[in-house]
Amino acid sequence: MNSPLVKHPGLNLGPSHGKDDEAAETVMFGFWLFLMSDAILFGMVFATYVISLNATVGGPGPHDVYDIKSIFIETLLLLISSFTFGMASLALKYRHSTTRLLGWLGVTLLLGLGFLALELHDILGMFAKGGVPNRSGFLSAFFDLVPLHGLHVSAGCLWLVCLVGQIARFGIDREVKLGIMRLALFWHFLDIVWIAIFSVVYLAGLT
Amino acid sequence: MNTNIENSIHPIASKQEERRDFRSYVWGFCLALLLTMVPFALVYWLAIPRFPLLILIGVFALAQILVHFRFFLHIGFKQKREDLLLILFSALLLTIMVAGTIWIMASLAMRMPLPM
């Protein structure tokens, strides 16, 4: 990409979108500020988790409550959803039909909901094995970190539904375009946080 | 209106750009998939001792984060200076705060063990 065309980090709409592309510059910079402060929040919760690793006070540890197969499927769902959201961004940028845009957004939403359903299933499985938040410091820290990510994904799904509603009501206007671009950043960001979660929490926990 | 004229002037450039953007997502997806599968496979089949395994998991995670930044978030060195500064400074803060917290608390735990 030529440097004058890159107005902000992330996929740029490009000059063919005229004023919408110009409006994106400040809005997207502001959203990056939010994402980076959210990254700091996640970082501190990660630090809390790591220092609580040994605080199991005789309760269940990582080997007793984590299920690597289900985590692997969750990871794939989130990764594929990142790719399908990328396809939605391209449909927006290159002005494909609204049906195609809605199709990719719909697939992304389903993958997001599938991820949430599996995560809920995992958490209920942990409860059944005695892994409840008030059992030990380790489990409190776990239920601080992983559901915090799940809460973000839920918020992303809700935002996605709202955007689909806006497309139905207003068509693809400037607000909708900027909304989709911000949600795309948010979605890719959550996938990056998940990389840290499956590596630090699950894979490192199961070594 | 304006946009249609520009599109009709550069229809080929736009198609090329679209193919390049599409390829970026496909590359990102394939690399990320590979970088996910390998550490999962290593942990699942337990081929190596714990400490080198932890290092490997860390390296794969870091590589995958960079792949996501490059191919999904399209961050390169052609960003405007303040955008790149924002990301790099946040990464620096994150490193100092997370590493510092873990260091201090680990040191505290070693010097002042809690009764188990």
Image (cartoon, rainbow, N blue to C red):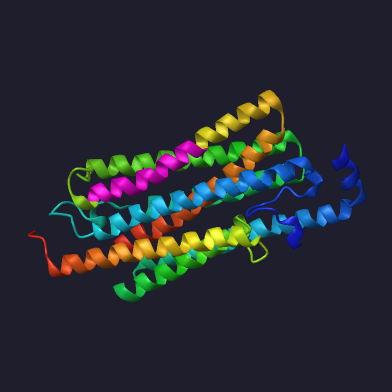
The residue lying toward the viewer, choosing from B83 and B43, is B83
Answer left or right for B116 relative to B29.
left
Give the percent coordinates (x, y) of residue B88: 52, 63
In the rendered view of the protein, which quadrant contains the N terminus of chain B? top right
Q: Is residue B88 above or below residue A29?
A: below
The residue lying toward the viewer, choosing from B101 and B115, is B101
Question: Is residue B61 visible in this depiction of the protein?
Answer: yes
Residue at x-position 42% and y-position 60%: B94
Q: How many marks?
A: 0
Residue at x-position 23% and y-position 63%: B105
The residue lying toward the viewer, choosing from A105 and A48, is A48
Answer left or right for A192 relative to B3.
left
**Residue farthest front in this picture:** B82
Q: In this view, does A6 lie above or below A119?
A: below
- Which residues lie in the magenta part? A139-156
Is residue A150 located in the magenta-colored stretch of the structure? Answer: yes
Answer left or right for B90 relative to B47.
right
State whether the magenta stretch is mostly helix, strand or loop.
helix
Is residue A165 located in the magenta-colored stretch of the structure? Answer: no
The image quarter containing residue B75 is bottom right
Answer left or right for B62 relative to B72.
left
The residue lying toward the viewer, choosing from A22 and A206, is A22
Give the percent coordinates (x, y) of residue A158: 51, 33
Residue at x-position 51% and y-position 36%: A157
Give the percent coordinates (x, y) of residue A187: 54, 46
In the rendered view of the protein, which quadrant contains the C terminus of chain B? bottom left
Question: Is residue A75 visible in this depiction of the protein?
Answer: no
Residue at x-position 18% and y-position 56%: A55
Give the percent coordinates (x, y) of residue A47: 32, 58
The image quarter containing residue B21 is bottom right
